[in-house]
Every structure is written in structure tokens, then in C-alpha cells.
Image (cartoon, grey):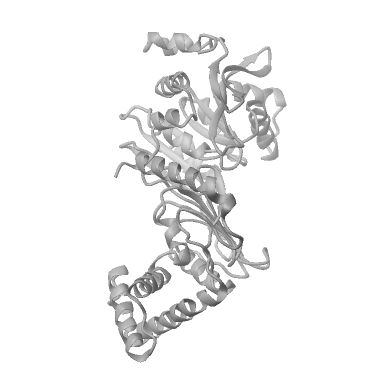
Amino acid sequence: MEYRGLLQRSWERRRGLSSRRAETPPGQEAGLLTAPVPGAADRKRPRVLRQRLFERFLRDIEWKGASDLLGPGEARARVRRLLDELADADAEALTAVERAQLEDEVVAEVCGAGPLEPLFADPTVSDVLVNGPDEVWVDRFGRLELTGVRFDGDDHLMRLLGRLVASQGRHLDEAVPYVDVRLPDGSRLHALIPPLAAHPVMSVRRARPVPFRLEELCSCGTVSPAMAAFLAAAVRNRLTLLVSGGTATGKTTLLGVLSSFIPRHERIITIEETAELRLDHPHVVSLEARLPNIEGLGEVTLRTLVKNSLRMRPDRIIVGEVRGPEVFDMLQAMNTGHDGSLTTVHANSPDDALRRLENLVLMGGFELPSRAIRELLGAAFDVIVQIARFPDGGRRVSSIREVVLEDERLTTVELFRFEEAAGGGRHVATGHRPRFLPRLAAGDPALAATFEKGV
């Protein structure tokens, strides 16, 4: 099934459901995954049966050994045997539907994401947010929705968190009550437990199984065709780009899309705190920072990785996000032959992005005058791409600006912007022609027309 078509059909169905949401009786939840939320009495028996089955499963594993537990297939076979035993002993037999649902739930408890398994299987869900055992939200197309998914209690949620974290060689307890890990499917999980929060909480940033293409960003209104043509040409011609935006605005997604225009013969080194980038490129080396262990040893910072990457013959360096002293080493690399690099930063505007980078250099303890830092920034970056999340849930590039350093003054000049209007808005060119336009137009003469005012 074509992935984009699936998302489109899900979106159309979601719009149809939202028109009926006002008529949903209190205590029920309309959504793609959840039927009306049953009352406590209706949920009690399936929950008790699932708990009994799970305990029996664990005892069965402990008694017979786990050496032959090869995966979900073997786990499902054992659960079916236990269900057969339950059916023989229980006078109130399960229906076929109840049995299949119970089987899926227990297997998900053992090998999957427990109650969250349906949400993890839904391609329209971009974030799963668990605020405690009785409150699970999802992000679909930029909108938050409360689901009917529930845990049995804090212990149930802690058991799932412990298994997901342990599968990646990490631990979560009172000594280390928070964790940030990458799951096997590429999703990013961040969790905190008491005493940092009243209940265990977690957020999962889902990894898209099929990377976005620039054409898809055009079709959903994130960028215009003219902006897409300019950004593609900028990456191919080794302009250095900074993607700026707030939390969950799509910075990493846009960074991955832009990296697809790096020529196939070039060597890319990516540097991230938690590896999220999934690049469609034949020559990628992915470096990931490491937190200190329980004794406080073994930490590997982004700054260490940036320094090491310079000795690995990179053609392009992609830093997932700069937020500390590594920004100084990155700026030096960009000014010593590693042009065409890409990175992101948390900021609300292009000018704020430059100020934040300057502050990060100063906070890193580098005793440099502000003028020298601005010269570094002006020489390092050519373009700033600002992306924002709008009230309708859409993520759009709100501004593209050229970085200009003149008379020791660092400024930005807008090339494209998003103009909001009733019912939406549109991307337009400002009419300004950047100084690097001849460099881009040499390979694509038609590119100059994209900068005509109003295009």
C-alpha cells in the first residue's frame, strides 16, 4: 500500500470523525483506533484474565526456561496453550473475538508495547504521550487527541518502561529516574518516573518507516515548489544551512529531506544526541553521544564527536541539533573546508537563531569578543530556514533568509516567507536576490525566476 495514500485516507476519515465528535456522549472517545471507552465493570474481566495469563506465562518461562523463546511466534504459541488451559478450567468460555483480543494483548505485554501496541502500529500517529496510567494522548497531523488506552496502574506502566529501556541496555530506577533512548524501529523514547513526576510519564517520537520526500512537503504545504527548488539547489551547491524552529515543528524531518540532495558520491557524517536521522544516502556514518554510566563515567559529548568527525574525512557534517559548546567546534569546521554542512537549533526566528548560537559559544566558556563570534557565524552560515507549527496543526516553513555580514554587523535578509490569510495562507518570494544566486544559477539558469517577487 502506498504510504502517502494511507495517510491521506486516514486524514479524510479523521476529518469525518471530527465533525461528529461534538455528538459523542460523555465518557466515550471517537477516534481511529478506539471504540467507545467501556465502563469499569466491563473492563474488569478482560483485565483480570490478561493479568492471570501474563503471570502464568512468566511462571511457565521460569519453569521451562527461556532458551527456546525465539520471538513473538513462540510467545504466541505458548499463550495459545495457556488459553486452552484457561478455557478448560473456566466455566464461562471466551468468545472467539475475546480470545483473539486477549491473545494479542498478552503477546504485546511480552514482546511488544503492551497497551500502546495499536498506537505504535498506526502510521498516522507521530507522537505517543503517556501522562500516567489513565491518560494517553497521540499526535495526528499536528493535533493532540486523547485515546481510550489505559494501563492497569503505575506498576503496569513501569513494567513496560523497564522492558523497553532494558532492551536498549539502559536502566530506569530511583537512582536514574529519567532516560532518553532510541527504540529498535528508530523511534525516540523519553521517560521520567517518580520522584520527578507524580506518575511514570513517557513520550515517544515515532520514526516514519518511509522517509519524507520534498514533493510530499510541497503537497502538504510545508514549502512551495519555488522554495523547494531553491533549497535543493542550495544543498547541491554546498551552501551551509541552519534549520531553526521550536519543539515538534519538524526540524529533524526537514533536515533529513534536505540531506537527500547531497550528491551520492559524497561522504556524510551525522552527529546526534539520540540518533533519529534516517538518510537515503549510500555513504553515511552515524555517530551518537553517550550519557555517563551510573558511576558517572563513560560520557561522550557532542563536542567530542564533532572533533572526531573532522578526522574521518567527511564531505558533509550534519549535526542533529546544537545546544552546547559543540557549536564552537562546528563553526570552526564550517570555516575550514567543510562547507555544505547542515544543522538545527531551537529558536523562534532566524535572528533569534543567530543570537542563540552566539550565546551558546559564550556559555561554553570561550573567551571571544562578540565581534569575532559574529564573524564566525557570518562566514559559516549562508541560509537560515525557519519552520513553525501553526494553529491548524500544519508545519510550514515560515521564512527563508540569507545571512549577511556587513561592516561587522550580522543580519538576515528574507528571501521567502509565509503570508497567513483567512482559511490558510501562501508562500511568496520577497523579490530579494541573494548574493550567492550566480553560484546556484550556474547549474540551473531557471532558478533565478523563483526569486521574482510574489512567486
Question: Residue 160: image x %, image y %?
Answer: 49, 68
Count every numbered label the image shows and give the total: 0
Question: Residue 395: image x %, image y %?
Answer: 54, 35
Residue at 50% of width from left, 11% of height from top?
451
Q: Quadrant of the N terminus?
A: top left
Residue at 63% of width from left, 27% of height from top?
350
Residue 294's image quarter? Answer: bottom right
Q: Please tell me whether residue 28 is drawn above or below residue 337 in the rendered image.
A: below
Q: Please tell me whether residue 138 is drawn above or below residue 254 in the rendered image.
A: below
Question: Residue 410: image x %, image y %?
Answer: 66, 19
Residue at 47% of width from left, 29% of height from top?
341
Residue 96's image quarter? Answer: bottom left
Q: Is residue 435 visible?
A: yes
Q: Please tell me whether residue 287 is drawn above or below residue 149 in the rendered image.
A: above
Q: Please tell me whether residue 209 is drawn above or below residue 172 in the rendered image.
A: above
**Observer-nearest residue: 443 or 267?**
443
**Observer-nearest residue: 354 or 227?**
227
**Observer-nearest residue: 122 or 94?**
94
Pick out the residue farthest to the front: 23
Question: Residue 75: image x %, image y %?
Answer: 32, 74
Q: Is residue 67 visible?
A: no
